[in-house]
Amino acid sequence: RKALARLAMRTQSEVVRQWREWAVDARTKKAKVRQALGRMSNRTLAGAFASWREHTARAARLKTSSAQVVRRIMHRALWEAWASWRSYVEDKAKLYDKMDAVVFRLTHLALAAAFNKWLEY
């Protein structure tokens, strides 16, 4: 009986050992499959991320160049406004200078006429 019991236990023990090996193998294979799927998924994600990054960089360059164009247009308009104002001020200053000269001549003409009349008196 003991011999039969040992034989039965040995057989059960062998079955359990084989099942354990099979379970470890199955777990290892499952992990490898999961890892392979993860790599494939990561490649897809990496490609999508690279595409997104390229798109974002292109959009940033476009935004920067657009801002530069707008800035140049605004500066040009500002510069033209400044030049126009400066020209206006210079023209006004020349006009005032001419008016001062006319007033000076008229003032001195009257003074000279008054002086001449005083001399005649």
Image: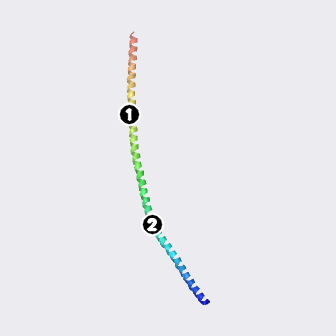
Give the numbered dot on residue 34: none
Which label's residue is closer to the chain start, 2 or 1?
Answer: 2
At horizontal 40% and vertical 19% (from top left) the residue drawn is 107
Label 2 crowding class (10 Å Cα cut-off): few <14, some 14-19, many 20+?
few
- The quadrant of the picture occupied by the N terminus is bottom right
- Tag nearer the camera, 2 or 1: 2
Q: Position of residue 45 (x, y in %)?
A: 45, 64
At horizontal 38% and vertical 30% (from top left) the residue drawn is 94
- Tell me the SS state at disc 1: helix
Q: Which residue is mark 1?
A: 88
Image quarter of residue 109 = top left
Q: Position of residue 49 (x, y in %)?
A: 45, 61
Q: Which residue is mark 2?
A: 43
Q: On screen, 113 above or below 93?
A: above
Q: On screen, 65 above or below 100?
A: below
Number of numbered discs: 2
- Tell me the SS state at disc 2: helix
At horizontal 38% and vertical 17% (from top left) the residue drawn is 110
Residue pushed farthest top?
121
Q: Amino acid at mark 2?
A: Arg
Left of 94 or right of it: where is 15? right
Q: On screen, 101 above or below 118?
A: below
Q: Position of residue 113 (x, y in %)?
A: 38, 15
Label 1 crowding class (10 Å Cα cut-off): few <14, some 14-19, many 20+?
few
Q: CA gap, disc 2 to disc 1?
A: 67 Å
At horizontal 49% and vertical 75% (from top left) the residue drawn is 29
Q: Nearer the viewer, residue 61 or 49?
A: 49
Image quarter of residue 103 = top left
